[in-house]
Amino acid sequence: MTATRRLVEAGTERLRAAGSETPRLDAELLLAYAIGVERTAVIAHGDAPVGPGAEATFDALVARRETGEPVAYLRGMKEFHGIALTVDARALIPRPETELLVDTAIATVMTALTSGADRPGVLRVVDIGTGSGAVAIALAVALRARRVPPEDLEITAVDVSPDALELARENAVAHGVGDRLRFLAGDLLPAGARSQPLDIVLANLPYLRTAELDSLIERRLSAAYEPRLALDGGPDGLTIIGRLLDQLAWGLAEDGVALLEIGGDQGESAMALVGERLPGWVGETLPDLAGLPRVVRLRRGAA
């Protein structure tokens, strides 16, 4: 039997040659998955022998990773905001950058609930383009931990893809928040927002430029395996976000807040689009840990 260290080293070399940006991490994660242990066990026990069955599984996983298939799809899960989500080709793999959207959403909801004690009805929150449900579920889990009564707010997860919604439902049930979320098939804002405007709109919509996405696919990177519908933001990357901005004019409450994730190089262009589509609105960009603009926060301007 081969020791874990030797398998990790061999897998790392194969993945480095295949162009992986994180070859050792990938190899460690895949070996841990093949054995059925945590990655820390692989790192800590480099001399431990690996049985022939697990070694064969690891070899097959590395071969698939060499073609560019994402580690998250190979393992069937992705850690995000302290929870583990089931992921597969039905939806986009959650990115670490999106955790800023969740953190900002949590703070926004808590502020609204605290300052709106006399608010009539529940706080209406909608996650547009929910995909695997990452943002809505992470928000619901965090609010449950803060003992926010479910009757105080209504969280609706919307996606145009029925397959993605099915995956989101599965993840919500797995994390015990299926009763705290509603799932709705639709293209951007629900029609009901015309009569009952939304208090908080969250959105992680496709923002890759079409040419950029095509380049990633040609290079056999993760995007080649993820749904194009969840990635392609049009020629400038802001086509779908622009459509949502148009809908916010009638769908966001007078004192509502919209939080939209954008690409790290889209800060200026996104704010210019806001000025064009929503004149008079107040907007700002929030930076991620790398200092790049990542979330646009919008409110209506003072009357």
Image (cartoon, helix red, strand yellow):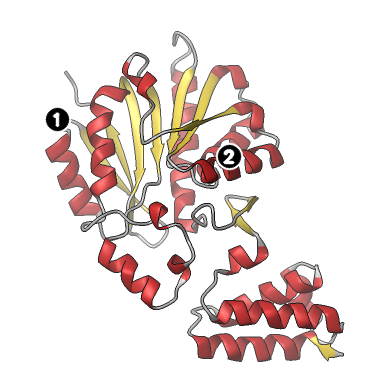
Q: Which residue does the image show at 32% across and 69% down from the upper left?
A: 214
Q: Nearer the viewer, residue 293 or 220?
A: 220
Please tell me which of labels 2 and 1 falls first in the chain: 2
Q: Which mark is residue 55?
A: none
| Tag count | 2
Instruction: Tell me: residue 31, above or below residue 297.
Output: below
Q: Is residue 102 above or below residue 98?
A: above
Residue situated in front as seen by the camera: 41 or 37? 37
Q: Which mark is residue 280?
A: 1
Q: Residue at x 39, y 52 (%)?
A: 229
Q: Which residue is mark 2?
A: 137
Q: Is residue 288 left or right of residue 143?
A: left
| Figure quadrant of the C terminus | top left
Quadrant of the rendered structure where residue 299 is?
A: top left
Residue at 12% from the left image edge and 39% from the top image edge: 276
Between 178 and 275, the one nearer to me in the picture: 178
Q: Position of residue 117 (x, y in %)?
A: 48, 12
Amino acid type of the residue tagged 2 in the rendering? Ile
**Residue at the (27%, 61%) spot, across then down:** 209
Mark 2 secondary-structure assignment: helix
Residue count near mark 2 (Cα–Cα under 10 Å), binned few <14, some 14–19, many ≥20: many
Name above or below for residue 115 compared with residue 23: above
Give the SS element for disc 1.
loop
Amino acid carrying label 1: it is Gly
